Structures are given as structure tokens and as C-alpha cells.
């Protein structure tokens, strides 16, 4: 008989007093749902868990010009877990990289917004991702390019937790440590659920902070839905001069829509009904 | 040939500060001159091909031109998804220099023998594929790849290969070179099989069989015009390559001719390695002989095909 799967991975998550989502966080979630309504599908919970991570990066941390996406001096943000792109699209539209109306075209035939983000199509998308485990290698290359070209640009790579099962992530982590890339920061969206189920069951990552430290990173852990916590942590970057940084962001898959939180079955939804969309909007407002 | 390729990268780097070199745990002393003179653009990374391809992609996205060098099988098989997504999907000017294309590493066995490398690289959109014949052609190829917008796969031979290229014929990416002209039989070859085919052509000429030799240093994009020109005047087209008969130059030529001639075209013979992993060691020449790719064997394959009365299309030798 197969062993029972962990029903709730929360028992191994630090206890945070996460403040209630403010209106900005609700608005961004509303836009994610709008895109999902337009496309009739999407990885919504994976986007909601990283919503505050991207919000804080784009509101408070990154240096960028949305009217000049290829501005050489900009900071780079790579969404390595490309399936979280609904969240990225909501933030990029909010920042004016493209009109918000574009969100409603998500996954339609001629849309620029696919089910995974593409660099050549979407202004503000730094790398085409979707195949997991690619973003950190690209980020290492960008961080080295900034060093070679004597630019102050910083590089931020947002990964999933399931994503870092990939060996390529650890190849690149080792390389970032070797080169002491303190202009590189990894943010792990640690929502504890991958496609099949709990990360503790499918492929346990613990002790996660120790792993990153062993690979040469300076580590911080935050409540990934607490805007102030994220802001304070990211203000301290780099945590240690001469070392890359990693922020382990403890998050909730589906955060802000109560009936899909922690639900592995919601990882990817297609053929979503009007009633389901309506319930998602209502849940966002009630959050 | 490898030394020439790396020397050219060094020369390019001295002239152009966008050029970066990335190696994956290469032999001690490799590119010491580059490391000493341009240390900020020299990267000798560990044995982590997925990482170095991503790293090269990130650098190229920000305007650098990375040359990545390691053994062909590791540069193609190990990190195929990184090559496909990071390099080809983004269409980045990263140059892959692949040591030991074909059966160069014969004594090291199938883990190091690259017989499907051109097939899998050729299948990727935006990728260019090159297999020069000798070090002098390599000397012209490497700088020419600076003008290639997307990624390039450069297949190295063993080194010390007979020099058959010359200044007279010039060099242009995507333009095949005809080393022997005329005749009812046309060899179409790439890499070091060109010199074998030329020797075979000389042997056949002495018997009154005139054989042209068309050298494809660029396997992709394919010089379709040159192939069609050779095929139109031939009754037998023989493609010979140090590669699996699946997916390499033989497949590319067969696809082109089958689509162009229909039933009225020349007979096509594709010579290469059958659908097997090598099971012998020895030298590259030993393995070429096992698979019938040495000059006398190529000549005999032509004799057999010419004397055969049965209509044969796209058969293996």
C-alpha cells in the first residue's frame, strides 16, 4: 500500500503573522484572474504565490524603464518558473510595459502573452522560460556580463520550489558561488506544492537554506506575502559582499483566493467555466 | 584543427571586446594566453554543460559573443534543452566549438563518439551547423561566424588532417565548394570525408569514371543551389559523411533531391554510419574503415552502384 501523502505541508513552514492583503495585492490578483478569464486556462496558484515577490521587486527594488525595456543599465528580473507568468504579466502591465487590455488576450492565437513568457514577444520579459531550471544559468551569464561591462545592473532570478529539483539549478548555483556574484539574487517561491503534491513528498528540499549556503550563497528567509518583510530583506542586498544572495520566500500556493490555496489539483486549469471565474473574482475581493 | 579554432578565438578576442571564451574543464594550459591577457573574458568552468550554455545565453543577451568549447557529445547530448531553448529560441550569437566530432575519440568508446551531433543540431531552428575539412578552412570559418546572427555549431575533426582547402576557392558561410567538377557521379561530403572522397574520385578518374566532389563546410543552412547543380548533371549522387546515416548531410541532401526531382532524379547513395553505437576501439581511421568510409571503400561503393542495373534510391552503403 502506498504511503499516505502529506495533506498539509504547513506543519514544516515557519509560522508567520502574514498581514491581510492590501488593495494593491488584490488588484494584481484581479488582473491575473482577468487574464485567466481571457485565456480560459492558466497556472493561477503558481502566480498568486509569487505575487508579492514580483510586486516588491518592481515597486521597490528594480531599476527599469518600462518605455525603454532594453535600457542597458536596467536591473534584470528573470521569471525562471515561467508557468507563474500570469503574475509577471499583471505586474508588467501595471508598470506600463504593455496595455492592460492585452491581458485579456492571454493564450489566444495572436497574443503576445502565452502560457509561458517569451522574451521576443513581451516587453519586459528578460528570458523565455517555461522549461524549468534555465533561469539561473542565464542570470549567472547576465551577472557576469554586467561585471565584464562594468555596469551596476543587478540580476534577480525567481525560481519555483519544484523547479529547483533540476540539477541545472545547482550547477549554476555552484558557478555563481565560485564567481562571488553579489549582483545576483535568487528568490525561491517556496509554496511547498509542486504538480503532484507536497514538495516534502515528491522531492524534499530541506534543509534548503543549508543547501544554498553550502553552494556559496548568503541566505535570508522571509514571509513571501509580507510586503514589509520582503522590502526590508531586499534593502539589505547583497547580504554579504562577494557572495550571491538567495531569499527563501515562504509562500502559499494560490494565496489570496481561499478555495484554491494549498490545492494541488489547481496547479494548472483549463476549460475553466464562467462560474469558476466568477468565484475567483469574488474570492479575491473577500481576501 | 582545435588549436587553430582556439587561436582564432584568441585573435578575435584581442580585436573585439565582445568576445568571451567559456570552457568546461578543458585540458591544463588550454588558452593560457587568453586567460593571461584577457582574464575578465576567460571562463574555465566546471563540468556543467547545462550551466555554461545558460551562462553563454545570458552573456549574449547583453551583447557579448561567447565561444563555448568542450567535447562534442557533451555539448550536444548533455545540454540539448539548454541549446534549444536558451540559444536557439532566443536566437543568440553563441558559438559552440565541439571537440572530436565524428569518431575522433575512437579509443574512448561510444560515450565520446559524436555520430548524431549534426542531426540533432540541424533539427533546431536558428542553429547553423559547420564541419570544416581542415585547419586552414577552420581559420576562415571561425571569424566568419562573427557575422552569424544566431547560434553556431562548429564540429572539429581530429587535427593534423590533410589540408585540402585553398585560398583560391575562397570561403563563404553557406556556400559549398566544388573541389572536383564534372562527371556522371557527384560526391557530396562534409568534414574530413571530403579528403577521402577526393582520393576516391582520383582513383575512379584513373578508371575513366569522372566524379565531382562538392564540399559542404556548412551543413545548415544547406547550399541547395550547389547541390541541385551537381545533381542535375549526375546520374548518381553519393553523400558521404562521418555521421549516422540518420539525420545528417545524407538526410538533408535526400530530402532536397526527393522534393525536387520526384521519380526522374539521380540515384542517391548515402554513406555513413548505420544505426548503431560503435562497438570497436582503435583509431578514427579504423572505425572509418569498419563503416566503409575510407577512399578505396568509397570508390568501390561508387563502382558497385554504377554497375548495378537496379534502380536504387536512398540506400545505405
Image (cartoon, coloured by chain):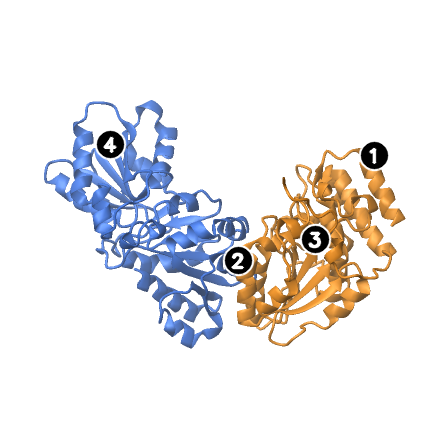
Chain colours: A orange, B blue
Position of B311 compared to A274: left or right? left
Residue annotated with mark 4: B236
The CA span between labels 2 and 4 is: 44 Å
Q: Disc 2 designates what residue?
A: B54
Separation of marks 1 and 4 at Cα, in angstroms: 67 Å
From what the image shows, is residue A221 above or below residue A204? below
Secondary structure of the residue carrying tag 4 is strand
SS at circle 2: helix
Q: Are marks 4 and 3 in contact (CB under 8 Å)?
A: no
Q: Is residue A132 left or right of residue A266?
A: left
Structural crowding at the residue carrying mark 4, measured as other residues with C-alpha within 10 Å and reported as few (<14), some (14–19) or many (≥20):
many
Where residue A215 appears, as percent x and y from the top left, is 57, 67
Residue nearest the viewer, comparing A219 with B210: A219
Marks 1,4: beta carbons within 8 A: no
Judged by depth in the image, the label closer to the viewer, 2 or 4, is 2
Real-space Cα separation, disc 1 to disc 3, in angstroms: 28 Å
B304 vs B36: above or below: above
Residue A96 at least partly seen: no
**Residue B150 — which label?**
none
- Marks 1 and 2 share the same chain: no
Residue sitting at x 84%, y 61%:
A17
The Cα atoms of the two marked residues, 3 and 2, are separated by: 26 Å
Q: Which residue is mark 3?
A: A192
Left or right of A201, for residue A256: right
Amino acid at each position: 500500500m502506498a504511503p499516505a501523502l502529506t495533506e498539509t505541508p504547513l506543519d514544516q513552514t515557519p509560522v508567520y503573522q502574514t498581514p491581510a492583503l492590501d488593495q494593491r495585492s488584490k488588484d494584481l490578483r484581479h488582473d491575473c484572474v482577468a487574464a485567466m478569464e481571457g485565456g480560459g486556462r492558466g497556472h493561477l496558484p503558481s502566480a498568486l504565490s509569487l505575487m508579492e515577490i514580483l510586486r516588491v521587486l518592481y515597486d521597490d527594488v528594480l531599476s527599469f524603464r518600462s518605455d525603454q525595456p532594453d535600457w542597458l543599465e536596467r536591473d534584470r528580473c528573470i521569471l525562471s518558473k515561467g508557468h507563474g507568468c500570469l503574475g509577471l504579466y499583471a505586474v508588467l502591465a501595471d508598470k506600463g510595459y504593455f496595455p492592460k487590455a492585452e491581458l485579456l488576450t492571454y493564450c489566444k492565437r495572436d497574443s503576445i502573452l502565452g502560457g509561458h513568457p517569451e522574451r521576443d514577444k513581451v516587453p519586459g520579459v528578460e528570458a523565455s522560460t517555461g522549461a524549468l531550471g534555465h533561469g539561473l544559468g542565464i542570470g549567472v551569464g547576465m551577472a557576469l556580463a554586467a561585471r565584464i561591462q562594468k555596469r551596476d545592473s543587478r540580476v534577480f532570478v525567481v525560481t519555483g520550489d519544484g523547479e529547483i529539483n533540476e540539477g541545472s539549478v545547482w550547477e549554476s548555483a555552484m558557478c555563481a558561488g565560485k564567481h562571488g556574484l553579489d549582483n545576483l539574487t535568487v528568490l525561491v517561491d517556496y509554496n511547498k506544492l509542486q504538480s503532484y503534491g507536497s514538495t516534502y513528498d515528491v522531492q524534499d528540499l530541506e534543509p534548503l537554506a543549508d543547501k544554498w549556503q553550502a553552494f556559496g550563497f548568503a541566505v535570508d528567509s522571509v514571509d513571501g506575502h509580507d510586503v514589509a518583510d520582503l522590502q526590508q530583506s531586499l534593502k539589505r542586498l547583497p547580504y554579504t559582499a562577494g557572495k550571491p544572495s538567495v531569499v527563501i520566500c515562504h509562500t502559499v500556493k494560490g494565496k489570496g483566493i481561499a478555495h484554491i490555496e494549498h490545492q494541488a489539483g489547481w496547479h494548472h486549469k483549463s476549460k475553466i467555466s464562467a462560474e469558476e471565474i466568477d468565484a475567483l473574482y469574488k474570492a479575491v475581493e473577500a481576501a | 584543427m582545435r588549436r587553430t579554432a582556439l587561436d582564432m578565438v584568441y585573435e578575435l578576442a584581442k580585436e573585439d571586446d565582445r568576445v568571451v571564451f567559456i570552457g568546461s574543464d578543458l585540458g591544463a594550459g588550454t588558452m593560457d594566453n587568453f586567460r593571461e591577457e584577457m582574464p575578465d573574458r576567460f571562463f574555465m568552468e566546471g563540468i556543467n554543460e547545462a550551466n555554461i550554455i545558460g551562462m553563454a545565453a545570458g552573456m549574449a543577451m547583453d551583447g557579448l559573443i561567447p565561444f563555448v568549447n568542450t567535447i562534442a557529445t557533451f555539448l550536444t547530448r548533455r545540454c540539448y534543452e539548454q541549446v534549444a531553448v536558451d540559444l536557439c529560441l532566443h536566437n543568440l550569437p553563441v558559438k559552440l566549438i565541439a571537440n572530436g566530432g565524428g569518431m575522433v575519440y575512437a579509443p574512448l568508446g561510444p560515450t565520446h563518439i559524436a555520430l548524431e551531433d549534426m542531426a540533432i543540431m540541424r533539427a533546431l531552428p536558428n542553429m547553423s551547423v559547420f564541419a570544416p575539412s581542415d585547419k586552414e578552412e577552420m581559420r576562415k570559418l571561425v571569424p566568419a561566424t562573427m557575422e552569424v546572427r544566431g547560434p553556431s555549431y562548429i564540429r572539429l575533426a581530429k587535427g593534423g588532417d590533410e589540408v585540402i582547402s585553398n585560398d583560391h576557392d575562397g570561403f563563404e558561410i553557406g556556400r559549398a565548394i566544388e573541389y572536383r567538377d564534372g562527371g556522371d557521379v557527384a560526391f557530396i561530403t562534409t568534414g574530413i570525408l571530403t579528403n577521402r572522397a577526393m582520393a576516391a574520385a582520383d582513383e575512379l578518374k584513373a578508371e575513366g569514371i569522372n566524379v565531382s566532389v562538392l564540399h559542404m563546410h556548412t551543413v545548415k543552412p544547406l547550399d541547395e543551389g550547389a547541390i541541385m547543380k551537381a545533381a542535375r548533371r549526375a546520374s548518381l549522387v553519393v553523400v558521404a559523411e562521418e555521421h549516422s546515416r540518420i539525420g545528417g548531410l545524407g538526410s538533408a541532401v535526400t530530402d532536397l533531391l526527393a522534393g525536387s526531382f520526384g521519380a526522374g532524379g539521380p540515384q542517391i547513395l548515402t554513406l555513413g554510419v548505420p544505426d548503431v553505437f560503435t562497438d570497436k576501439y582503435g583509431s578514427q581511421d579504423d572505425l572509418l574503415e569498419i563503416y566503409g568510409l575510407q577512399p578505396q571503400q568509397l570508390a568501390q561503393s561508387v563502382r558497385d552502384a554504377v554497375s548495378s542495373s537496379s534502380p536504387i534510391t536512398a540506400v545505405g552503403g
